[in-house]
Amino acid sequence: MSNWEEIGQELVDKLRTVKKESTIQKLAVAVVDQIREHYPKPNSRKTPLSKVRKAVLTAFPDTETQEHSWQYFTNKGKGNIERYQHLALKYLTLSSEEWDAVGNETRQQWKAQQEAQKPEQQPQTVEATQQPITLNDMNISQLQLDAETQQMVEVAIAHSGMSLADFVRRACQVYAKTVTGKLGQYESDLTTVPTEELLTSATYRTHPGRAEELTRRAIYALETHNNNCTEKSQKWMITQTAIQSLTGSKPATIKAILERYQTRLDDHNSKHELNPYDNRKPGRKIDDEIDLATLVSDGLNLN
């Protein structure tokens, strides 16, 4: 006859490396099937099952809050105390017929456990009397993350010392602050901010409207410069490269912004008969001849 304490310990050793609920279920069901094979009579199966469950409980004690992704919430048995248990205990159970053979008290406990498992095991129509599943009831697999993200989250949770529920709440809080912070930046007006600050201050370095505002000012600066020149050799064609040199913004960002100014730029460049070759000035740089911060001190009164 099998030593059920040892079998329980073997199950515990396997559970230490398993987090996925479907795998935990397979391991637990395999032990229950083994008990059935050794004990043909249902009323003799309770004791070995209790020994296995005791081994799991000893290795993975109940907790008041969810501390691991492989735990589930229950308030059945043990005086209806709310707690988190290892998922294996949810599947280390016998059928109703087997519990009937053991006795009324244990049968009622089994039925209570089955009721607790129903929301996860089979789809049910949501009714007014049904208790909703809360964040505290969930395990990480229910978040339906891809494998790489789930592994990363599991490592982060382990490092943080938080429960899954607390970690998700904290992650939502942090991301919400990021999004609303960006929203506030989008809604802020940069018109009055000095050009020197937009170019050099770390405060505006990541502002989502910075490139748009600097591009607007750079276009005005180039137009003003060209309109005041007496010689064509002094002029610069307004191009993406010219704007990039004056603002330091990314080429792809400037390209997208200039699409909205294309007609204006074409008209100005045509007016001064400028083409890309006019910007090839050996030994000369556009940002040496055009000081954006000096020529356009802010974004006010720009045409």
Image (spheres, rainbow, N blue to C red):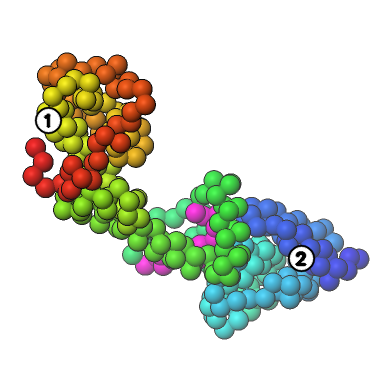
Near-viewer residue (155 or 180)? 180
Pick whichever, 265 or 290, lies toward us: 290
Say whether residue 111 is left or right of residue 252. right
Q: Which mark is residue 12?
A: 2
Distance from label 1 to label 2 (Cα)?
Answer: 83 Å
What residue is drawn where x is 61% and y is 59%?
155
- What residue sits 35% from the left and 55% below the top? 202
* Magenta segment boundaries in residue numbering: 129-143
Please give the count of numbered marks on the rendered protein.
Answer: 2
Q: Of helix, strand and loop, which one carries label 2?
A: helix
Between 301 and 30, the residue placed more toward the observer is 301
Q: Position of residue 117 (x, y in %)?
A: 55, 63
Which image quarter holds the N terminus? bottom right
**Residue 108, can we see it?**
no
Q: Give the quadrant of residue 158.
A: bottom right
Residue 228: mark: 1
- Residue 27, placed above or below residue 6: above
Quadrant that contains the C terminus: top left
Do the residues bearing badges 1 and 2 touch, measured as CB atoms within 8 Å? no
Q: Secondary structure at mark 1?
A: helix
State the image quarter where residue 44 is shown: bottom right
Name the residue type under label 1. Asn
Disc 2 residue type? Val
Report the front residue among 259 and 294: 294
The residue lying at 32 percent from left, 22 percent from top is: 281
Q: Position of residue 76 (x, y in %)?
A: 56, 75
The spot of residue 136 in percent (x, y) is 48, 68
Asked whether residue 91 is in view, the answer is yes
Image depth: mark 1 or mark 2 in front: 1
